Image (tube, coloured by chain):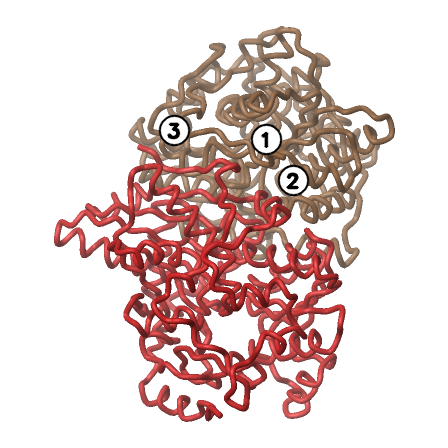
Chain colours: A red, B brown
Amino acid sequence: MKTKILLKESEMPTHWYNVVADMPNPPTPPLGPDGQPVGPDALAAIFPEEIIKQEVSSDRWIKIPEEVREVLRLWRPSPLFRAHRLEKMLNTPAKIFYKNESVSPAGSHKPNTAVAQAYYNKQAGIKKLTTETGAGQWGCSLALAGQMFGLEVEVFMVKVSYGQKPYRRTMMRTWGANVHASPTNLTESGRSILAKDPNSEGSLGVAISEAVEIAANRPDTNYALGSVLNHVLLHQTIIGEEAKKQMSMVGEYPDMVFAPCGGGSNFGGIAFPFFADKAAGKQVELIAVEPTSCPTLTKGTYAYDFGDAIGLTPLMKMYTLGHDFMPPGIHAGGLRYHGDSALISQLYNEGLLGAVAVPQTETFESGVLFAKSEGIVPAPESTHAIAAVIREAKRCAETGEAKTLLFNLSGHGHFDMTSYDRFFAGELEDYEYPDEAIKESLKHLPQVG
Amino acid sequence: MKTKILLKESEMPTHWYNVVADMPNPPTPPLGPDGQPVGPDALAAIFPEEIIKQEVSSDRWIKIPEEVREVLRLWRPSPLFRAHRLEKMLNTPAKIFYKNESVSPAGSHKPNTAVAQAYYNKQAGIKKLTTETGAGQWGCSLALAGQMFGLEVEVFMVKVSYGQKPYRRTMMRTWGANVHASPTNLTESGRSILAKDPNSEGSLGVAISEAVEIAANRPDTNYALGSVLNHVLLHQTIIGEEAKKQMSMVGEYPDMVFAPCGGGSNFGGIAFPFFADKAAGKQVELIAVEPTSCPTLTKGTYAYDFGDAIGLTPLMKMYTLGHDFMPPGIHAGGLRYHGDSALISQLYNEGLLGAVAVPQTETFESGVLFAKSEGIVPAPESTHAIAAVIREAKRCAETGEAKTLLFNLSGHGHFDMTSYDRFFAGELEDYEYPDEAIKESLKHLPQVG
């Protein structure tokens, strides 16, 4: 019984897949405060030209530079696994496959785009990249990527995480990055927050503002974002492309593809290459899995909103809970985002993608079941996909359907063991965000134009 | 430039290699307190028959049961990497290869034997395995393996680690193991220590005594050891066998093979299959790398000594610093062992293996250099091999020799980031154990007979 399906290095994809080419409608443009579409020029202060081109491209295939492929080869192609033991434990006729993105040195899928972004910035003569990080997955990924191309990396880490999650902070330093607890005194944004509350524990929104501010003001410095934007999702499509090849190597094609969905790069990365087939008439369900505590797709509204909490970014048309929505402190930090990728939002709005929300304790129960059967201890984000897959596999056990299910195991949980500890201690809560509260935060949606 | 050399699942070794078949002299027998060789029967209280057979076997090849191979397939064959980026950073003509054993769910090479031991115990009708663990690598490995075969696992974790390193403790629980802070009140051994010192922080020796005591007194319970013994090294030879195949796939053969050496399973695992070639006349240097703070091979004496600190085990002829030698609290917990495998000791005594000791700060410097070039943050144990390889690669840079170097990257450092933190803070010390102190602890060697 084959367990791992491996691609050779020579079989690693040579191009990223751009879903825009197969969307039934053109993507909605980002808008400025005046309600007018934001041109590529407006992004030039913080992104290099090649990235901006990718952000607005409608070409179906975009070549992966050989220098990027060379770094990706440190862990790619990543293995695809058949979860024989999980299937057996669930006594299901369903076939379960997972793409293992936890094998990157940073432990998640995030370096796929970090490496590409570092490369294009290096090519553009940029010396330093700034970014924000919550628990540290994205900060680690950019630190790793910057190191590989000889770029300085400056990370604004949300202060509460900086104190509580020192391990990823140390990992970033091991890769040579400079890490600050945000809010800092280094930026206007940071100082304005500290003036109001000197003990502020920070937030992802504030950290983004700090990182963008520095990049915008220094010609040799750019900013890198780990999710949401089109080019980020583009770089992640290598996951789904590889997965398609690997499934076909064992003569399989998924009936359903699942991935956790926060900003969307995890889900877009595995799902978009299958969307290409769906657009061509193939039957395949693509399911974004989100926490019930931050139910952007399942309970949000499709509207123009800011990407950050403060209102510095252009407006993007997306499913949103309101940019000042503050999700509860669940342990899947990567899924605590008020909005979602514009591309995913548009396709979801058109009924071409599915979404489901799962509560926190169910995700940890699923993660433990996965660890007990398949060995790997998954990241709290990844357990969301696992939970949805287990629901479906159990349904198959009842109906007798032998569906083929694929999910993205986006990361390992080695830096999340305190969360598992709290789960075992019965301390985790299931937040069901009240509809009233969502209605309230949606009242603060910006007026367009 | 090929980076990863992968074997197919079908190319995973079908047999373990037993170095005893190629040793110039038969292994020295373990002795009882009376100075007489200990027969297999004496081990039957804590080990299943198949393990005991392997412990005393001189067959060159021992079949890996299909049930064991099926579990190993969750991460094996493990990848072999060419360290192109490290070579470039060192500007060396040497070719550097590493076997990546950090890809197992427990994060090190240890599950290779844990899985085999769990299987043989399950076959023998055993319901529960006991063991000890320091930082938790071995405990995690046995927890994982026990879970895979439906065995209960009870781990005695050294109390100081239990408090300071909660993450591996939680990982063991995720895989269903029962973890105690040792010394406990559950055993005579534990109670005797607590009677003398109620605040005892424990030691590996005490934890071994507790685990062995429970296994010896319960018919349905056995004990599992993670290193030192012949069968443990046997199970690890799958590492070197795979590495040989992978090197030959790219037309290479190592001039030198390096691995960290504590109890010896890491080093024996990668080195023994190459020893087979050496015994047949091939030129290859096999180098055990140990800490200067616990210099068993480089400064110890070749004599009969106890395997544990208290004196419960049979006497084994090995390089030892004295069974009551207490190595300083360095961060490579897996290398803090007073003795060494009897097989490795004998071959080293006969001049067939090499050894080198490296100081702690050099190992962390090497680990950071490795992370910056190859991405992976290595375990403190593994950084010892890296340090020795970097020394040799730098020597090659001076002499112009294009040697081929291979080492075992035995584990990742995801649970050792506090150690890296202390390194960055300049808080790590280099312990050079004084010759006088070693002489002193060697005075306590047991009288044989």
User: Tag 3 or tag 2, which sits nearer the N-term?
Assistant: 3
**Up-down relation of residue B290 to residue A147 (above or below):** above
Viewer-side residue, B397 vs A163: B397
Inspect this view and state whether residue A207 appears: no
Point 49% across, 52% down: residue: B169
C-beta proximity under 8 Å, tags 2 and 1: yes
Q: Dot 1: few (<14), some (14–19), or many (≥20) neighbours within 10 Å?
A: many
Quadrant (top left, top right, bottom left, bottom right) of the N terminus of chain A? top left
Report whether A389 appears left or right of B158.
left
In the rendered image, which quarter is residue A272 located in? bottom left
Specify which label sits upstream in the sequence, 2 or 1: 1
Q: Amino acid at mark 2?
A: Glu
Question: In this figure, which residue is indicated by the disc labeled 1?
Answer: B266
Q: Residues within 10 Å of mark 3 (few under 14, many from 20)?
A: many
The image position of residue A72, as x and y in percent, is 57, 47
Crowding around mark 2 (Cα neighbors within 10 Å: few <14, some 14 to 19, many 20+) is many
